[in-house]
Image (cartoon, rainbow, N blue to C red):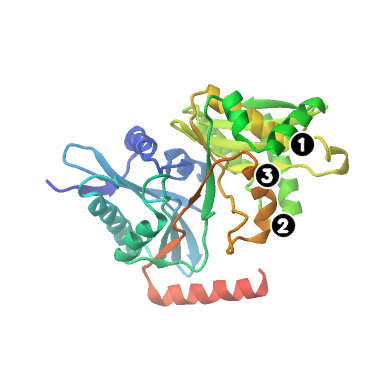
Amino acid sequence: MPDVAREAQPEDRERWDSFVVSRPEGDPLQAWAWGEAHAGSPERPIRWLVESADARLRAVMQLLARPAGFGRGVAYSPHGPLWDREAAGGEAAAAAVIRASRESLSRNGAIVLKCDPRSALDADSSGRIATKLEALGFRRARYDLQAPTTRIVDLLDGGDQLLASWHADARRLSRRAEREAVTVEIDRRGSAPAIDDFHAILEATAERGDFRARSRSFLQRAADAFAKSSGWYTVLARHDGRAIAGMALPRIGDRAYYLYGASLKTPELKHKYGAYAAMAAAMRALAADGVRTLDMWGVVEPDDPNADPTWQGFSGFKRTFGGRPLRHPGTFDLVLDPFWYRVRDLRETLRARLGR
């Protein structure tokens, strides 16, 4: 019997997450918990899967659908879809889950389906994935929705081997933070006080960097959802009891992800190096919990001619902790309504020119 595509149900959650963990390119944005984190937001999670006759999952695709005005909508599959790339018929399963999603979205007035599947180290190159998407009718999007490049850090033994893999600056500044009496606490439960402290730092960082921070309620929902499966770490560096740097790290299987990071930059904190203390402690804790790798989630390389210059600061910080560079295919669009797609594209182009 052929594979069957259908919309996922709550009872599919365990199998869904097991499939995401099984894929080397799978990450938290396709985990069931990520959809839960958007509950109550304008972005509604929709989940499609393809399964074989013996109920084995062959592909999954979690979408976030949001209204775009005039009764229309836009759907985005963050870091999806996922499919069994190595198996016979794997590409057919990918095509089936995309086709089912497309048909459902078209019936409900969607303008475009956007997706950006990930690359995996030592596996599919970004070019091959792009070719597969284009064969399925996708086109390269004007803008990427996620970072196209990152670094994957092997956490090794979590001790001396890990320390030796860092740049000398990371070793020196994390030790300096210890001498400055910076301490680090790691919350696994998604507790409200930890989220409060992290969000306050994140808002200060967003104001300084002129970007929009995730809301406190979103962070709490994400923490609650991932903590159900022991997949959440709120890391806070403190000095004299004050939270000065932090990060939010979801985990799936033996892989963790530097999803959000933030730090204060007031003059009295110049030589405290809270971010280095937080990263060092997080890596040690993750390794002790059996995590093998940490995805730095957005790193540009010094020799990348296409790199956004505003990313150089935090990318330099992340690169001091080593890791192997990884490039993803980027964002692709499957146009569902050509007329409204052109209207939307024109509007986005004008907004970009006007700096809005």
Please, which residue is most extreme toward the right here? 268
Around disc 1, counting alpha carbons within 10 Å, would you say few (fewer than 14), some (14 to 19), or many (20 or more)? many
Query: How far across and down, in percent of the image, does residue 212 sit?
Result: 66, 54
Element carrying mark 1: loop
Q: Residue 317 — which label?
A: 3
Residue drawn at the location 47% of the way across and 45% of the way down: 29
Q: Residue 314 — which label?
A: none
Residue drawn at the location 32% of the way across and 58% of the way down: 104
Around disc 2, counting alpha carbons within 10 Å, would you say few (fewer than 14), some (14 to 19), or many (20 or more)? few
Q: Quadrant of the C terminus?
A: bottom right
Residue 341, image quadrant: bottom left
Compared with 7, 139 (above or below) is below
Could you tell which of marks 3 and 1 lies nearer the N-terminus? 1
Q: Contact, CB < 8 Å: mark 3 with mark 1? A: no
Query: How far across and down, in percent of the image, does residue 149 sit?
Result: 53, 53
Label 2 amino acid? Answer: Asp
Mark 2 highlights which residue?
210
Query: How far across and down, in percent of the image, does residue 15 sit?
Result: 32, 34
Could you tell which of marks 3 and 2 lies nearer the N-terminus? 2
Residue 323 visible somewhere in the drawing: yes
Element carrying mark 2: loop
Mark 1 highlights which residue?
273
Label 3 amino acid? Answer: Phe
Mark 2 → mark 1, Cα distance in angstroms: 22 Å
Around disc 3, counting alpha carbons within 10 Å, would you say few (fewer than 14), some (14 to 19), or many (20 or more)? some
Task: State left or right for residue 252 relative to residue 260.
Answer: left
Mark 3 → mark 1, Cα distance in angstroms: 11 Å
Residue drawn at the location 32% of the way across and 43% of the way down: 8
